[in-house]
Image: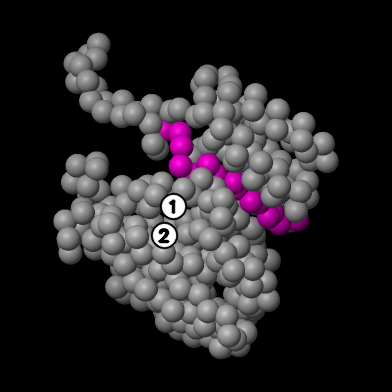
Amino acid sequence: MKSYTIALLRGDGIGPEIVDSAVRVLEAVGEKFAIQFSFKPYLIGGAAIDACGEPLPKATVEGCLAADSVLLGAVGGPKWDNLPGHLRPEKALLGIRSAMGLFTNLRPAKLYPALKGECPLRADIVENGFDIMIVRELTGGIYFGERGYREGKYGEEAYDTEAYSRFEIERIARVAFETARKRSKRLTSIDKANVLETSRLWRKVVHEIAQEYPDIEVCDMLVDNAAMQLVRNPSQFDVIVTSNMFGDILSDEASQITGSIGMLPSASLNEGKRGLYEPIHGSAPDIAGQGKANPIATVLSAGMMLLYAFGETEASEAIVSAVDKVLEAGYRTADLAHGAPALSTTEMTDMIIKML
Ligand code: IPM
Ligand code: MN
């Protein structure tokens, strides 16, 4: 029997609830497809700060590096909001991405036919649906640049800097071109080349790499325009490649037009493709512990893990199709129920398992 070790980073807020849902789904799928999982929990974020005074303990990093793959819930919450930057829960997320070398973040955003009515866009705009794959650079740019405080023209000022090397742009561009090759062969590279030097290098390098992929149709788009086009005509996009911060912002925007941010999974990959899998949403402290969270984004993240980390195509498809069936049958958690009676996190999980 195949067997995989998965490090679990439950984190804060709704993190523990949704990770436990995904674990139950993985166990059910494992039974069906004869795959054994062993789960090893590690502390991260606020939970780690409370237990050992730091957001990313060494044991967590070592556990993640030793495991076959990593499943993460979410980190952060008001309790830790006033800590200095380097001690904040979010720092742990950046730390683990960096420690594992996860430079690629795949964030698929598609409109489920069953959720068409949840999309805030006019019906004629989403008539043909949309299915976008955002390839976000994850270990560079302004998230990891030099930052600090200094005396400026108007006294105290803070600064963050964005830097991208040719190497970093080349490797994420190649991932994006390869991804486009497996889909509709269309790639949009999003930048702010009319203002930023990093974007000008980004654009130049993407064009160079494009020479290696003559079968892919690539176009550039400025990020402000892209933000507009995403709500004006989302079906024009297939694969998007962009920097760390633009990808962060655009993927949240994309999630809203799918109906709920509670639906979007993500895969963070390094060269080895074992990676870390997490929903794109945050820890939602306002609904934590109430059983209201939508577990689908995390369950689908586990589905991405089966596919990308383990090559378990059938098991991965089983999860995706179970989620489809649950939505088609009209089951909804509170984020999608508009005040109508909704399923709890556990009930939604039970329903997905039933449909497997
Ligand atoms: C995300 C989150 C993180 C990010 C935060 C929590 C550091 O918003 O995964 O999108 O900005 O990358
Ligand atoms: Mn984000």
**In the rendered structure, does residue 137 fall within the stretch colored magenta?**
yes
48 horizontally vs 231: left or right: left
- Look at 37% across and 73% down and name the residue there: 40
Q: Which amino acid does the dot numbered 1 rest on? A: Met
Q: Which of the pair 44/351 is nearer the observer?
A: 44
Res 310 quadrant in image: bottom right
- How packed is label 1: few (under 14 Cα within 10 Å), some, or many (20 or more)? many
Residue 141 screen position, x and y as percent: 45, 34
67 horizontally vs 111: left or right: left
329 horizontally vs 214: left or right: left
Residue 154 screen position, x and y as percent: 22, 14
The residue that label 1 is drawn on is 100
- Look at 17% across and 64% down and name the residue there: 51
Going from N to C along the chain, the mark reached first, 1 or 2, is 2
Res 214 quadrant in image: top right
- Look at 52% across and 83% down and name the residue there: 36
Dot 2 falls on a residue whose secondary structure is helix
Q: Which residues are magenta?
A: 128-142
- Look at 48% across and 65% down and name the residue there: 69
Kindly tell me whether residue 115 is visible in this rendering. no
Q: Which amino acid does the dot numbered 2 rest on? A: Leu
The residue that label 2 is drawn on is 65
Quadrant occupied by the C terminus = bottom right
Quadrant occupied by the N terminus = bottom right
Judge: label 1 CB < 8 Å from ligand 1.
no
Residue 173 screen position, x and y as percent: 64, 38
